[in-house]
Amino acid sequence: MSDIVELERRIVAALERIGQGLDALGSGGGAEDGTDPAELDKLREALETERGVNAQLNERVKALQERQETQVARLEQRAADLTARAEAAEADVDRLRAVNAKLRETSVALREANAQGLGDPAAIDAALLAELEALTALRASDRAEIDSILAELMPAAEEGVAHA
């Protein structure tokens, strides 16, 4: 893009020089001062050609800027989506850690009760509930991971369908 800006700067400078030359030729009165009207017409034609090229370059620069802005907006949205997914996954991991810690505690209590020969129904219920909660948290974490993978694959799948 810096090449386009440099070319545009050079064309504008050339147009200014041509315009100054035409002004000097135009103020001289034409054929009376020895200037060739054909040469003057060539210079005017060159000026119009350069103006056309300059306008085309301006349009290309504008199109590039619009494309860049669109791409930046899309990337910013994707970054926001990925950040939200990462935060959700982190929350799931924290929940899973807490549930697993509770499961370990109840398992230790259940083993101790078993070692003493006491069949504590409350400890068994607590252990089963902790295990159920751990499995639920693990399933939610797995589902979040699957959703994240699907979110990454869907654009590629939709692109493939569009090209088919």
Image: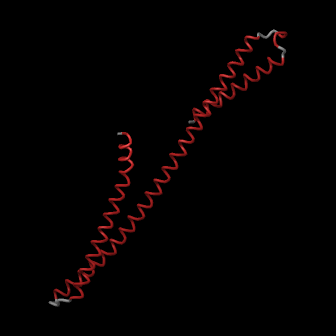
Residue 14 percent coordinates (x, y): 69, 25
Name the residue at 55% across, 45% down.
Answer: 69
Residue 127 percent coordinates (x, y): 24, 81
Q: Quick one: 6 or 125, which is closer to the camera?
A: 125
Name the residue at 85% across, 9% down.
Answer: 32
In the picture shown, does residue 80 fall above or below 29? below
Residue farthest to the left?
117
For the N terminus, the image quarter is top right
Q: Quick one: 113 or 55, which is closer to the camera?
A: 55
In the picture shown, does residue 127 fall above or below 7? below
Q: Answer left or right for 72 relative to 104.
A: right
Q: How many marks?
A: 0
For the C terminus, the image quarter is top left
Residue 63 percent coordinates (x, y): 56, 38
State how the image is colored.
secondary structure
Name the residue at 37% across, 39% down.
Answer: 163
Q: Quick one: 54 or 1, which is closer to the camera?
A: 54
Residue 70 percent coordinates (x, y): 52, 46
Name the residue at 84% across, 14% down.
Answer: 29
- Dividing the picture into quarters, in which one does residue 120 lie? bottom left
Q: Quick one: 49 or 99, which is closer to the camera?
A: 49
Q: Answer left or right for 5 relative to 127.
A: right
In the picture shown, does residue 5 fall above or below 19? below
Q: Answer left or right for 121 relative to 56.
A: left
